[in-house]
Amino acid sequence: MQLPDLTRMGIAFAVALIAMSYLAIDAGVADVSSGTIAKRIEIAQASIADAAMSQHQVASAVQARTHRGHQKPASTVE
């Protein structure tokens, strides 16, 4: 694996660990009903997925912009 891939995996792991820790603490302090915990897990998963998609969109935009910068200008034929 390349270094950027490992960095992304490390960030994703840290975010997931923090989210699960927050959910565990919040569930222990507040309400312990399984429905509430399941809903909070769904919200955390959606948040993590949204963050991952946002990162992918930014990376794609940067890559597209960089690619456009390296293209040769089109020649005009009259």
Image (cartoon, grey):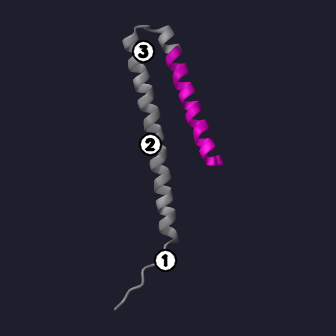
Can you tell which mark lies on residue 33?
A: none
Q: Is residue 3 left or right of residue 41?
A: right
In whole angstroms, how far apart are the C-alphas of marks 1 and 3? 55 Å
SS for callout 2: helix
Asked if residue 29 is positioned above or below residue 7 in the image, the reply reads: above
Residue 30 forms part of the magenta stretch? no
Query: Which residue corresponds to the image point at 44% horizontal and 35% vertical from the top-left?
Result: 49
Q: Residue 76, how many percent across, how many down?
A: 38, 86
Q: Earlier in the sequence, mark 3 or mark 2?
A: 3
Residue at disc 3, secondary structure: helix
Mark with earlier residue (1, 2): 2
Residue appearing at x 36%, y 13% in the figure: 35
**Measured along the vertical axis of the image, is residue 19 above or below residue 9?**
above
Residue under pointer 2: 53
Where is residue 11 drawn, in percent x and y?
58, 37
Residue indicated by mark 3: 37
Dot 3 surroundings within 10 Å: few (below 14), some, or many (20 or more)?
Answer: some
Mark 1 neighbour class, 10 Å CA radius: few under 14, some 14 to 19, many 20 or more: few
Residue displayed at 50% across by 65% down: 67
Residue sticking out furthest to the bottom: 78
Q: CA distance from mark 3 to mark 2?
A: 24 Å
Label 1 vs 3, first from the N-terminus: 3
